[in-house]
Amino acid sequence: MIAMFSFSKSLSSFQVIKEMKVELLIIGVILMISVSVIPSYATIFQEKLLESDSVRISFGDDMINSNGNVTPTIKTVELKSNVGSILVKNPIFRAMGNSFAIKSFEDSTIIYGINKGPTFNLHTLIFVEGNTIKLNDVAKFSISEISKQVIPEETVSKTNHLNMLVQSMQTTYNAKDLHFDVKTFDKSKYSGNDFQNFFGKIDGVKITAVTKNPDGKILDTQTGVTKYGIYMGKIYVPANLWSKGWYTIEISASSDIGTAQKTIEFYVAGQTPPKDGNSSP
């Protein structure tokens, strides 16, 4: 009886091994057909993650083997489940064109990846105590979390050499113009605040002036360039349309030597006050 039981157990193990060999042979034939005309290089894997619902493969830098062929390296292989993931021990990678096989003798696991353009059909076989667990799903590349260290390029720090001064009327009325002036200087020549100074002035600086009402609504936008170091702006306050209050002009200047920003505030006092008993138009 003991001999018959031992023989029956050996026969059962032989049948499992035979089934495994048949399955591996079928998948191997599929792989051979899919990569028969593809050269043996695998740079598409470099520093990428290949992930499906059941498997996560992290690739490292490509390596050149002793035969001069470029082969990818594996950083980690994980088997995923609803309760977590398990790292596959000592996975061995073999590329066949853009398809591949991964084997782990320690964990009795084989993963076949058959390339289908931007995706891979994954066939995972896990051999546990005479049983075979089969997982079939689709994987695709994503950006690797374990990527090369990015070394920032050296940047030459730019010094802002633009100096801008502004002046304007502080109060205006309906149906009147508000005048404002902008002067631009090379800061290395003049960095002071005297608006009457012209030493170090520069031309061709782009000026943008944005007028806003007390609620921040944009009422006017104008652009121009400095000539003889100055830009002279003018804003018309329409009759009976702008309510009393403080308004702003946000002025920005830009040139090849730098940028500058200033804000002018002015008060709209309503209707023009009487002069000699009459109202100004």
Image (cartoon, rainbow, N blue to C red):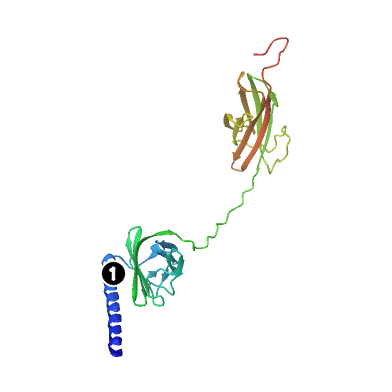
Tag 1 residue: 27
Q: Is residue 266 at all visible to an observer of this figure?
A: yes
Q: Give SS at disc 1.
A: helix
Q: Residue at x 63, y 34 (%)?
A: 250
- Name which quarter of the figure residue 122 lies in: bottom left
Residue type at tag 1: Ile
Q: Where is residue 240? Give x, y as percent.
A: 62, 18
Quadrant including the C terminus: top right
Q: How many marks?
A: 1
Q: Residues within 10 Å of mark 1 (few under 14, many from 20)?
A: some
Q: What residue is at 64 percent from the left and 48 percent from the top? A: 159
Q: Position of residue 211 (x, y in %)?
A: 61, 30
Q: Nearer the viewer, residue 152 or 111?
A: 111
On screen, residue 211 versus residue 4, left or right, reads: right
Residue 225, picture quadrant: top right
Q: Position of residue 149 (x, y in %)?
A: 52, 62
* Residue beneath the point at 26% across and 67% down: 33
Is 159 above or below relative to 168? below
Which residue sits furthest front? 1
Q: Residue at x 31, y 89 (%)?
A: 2
The residue nearer to you, when weighing 195 against 29, is 29
Q: For the N terminus, which image quadrant?
A: bottom left
Q: Is residue 62 left or right of residue 117?
A: right
Q: Quadrant of residue 22?
A: bottom left
Q: Quick one: 167 or 85, which is closer to the camera?
A: 85
Mark yes or no: residue 75 visible.
no
The residue lying toward the viewer, choosing from 103 and 191, is 103
Q: Position of residue 85 (x, y in %)?
A: 45, 67
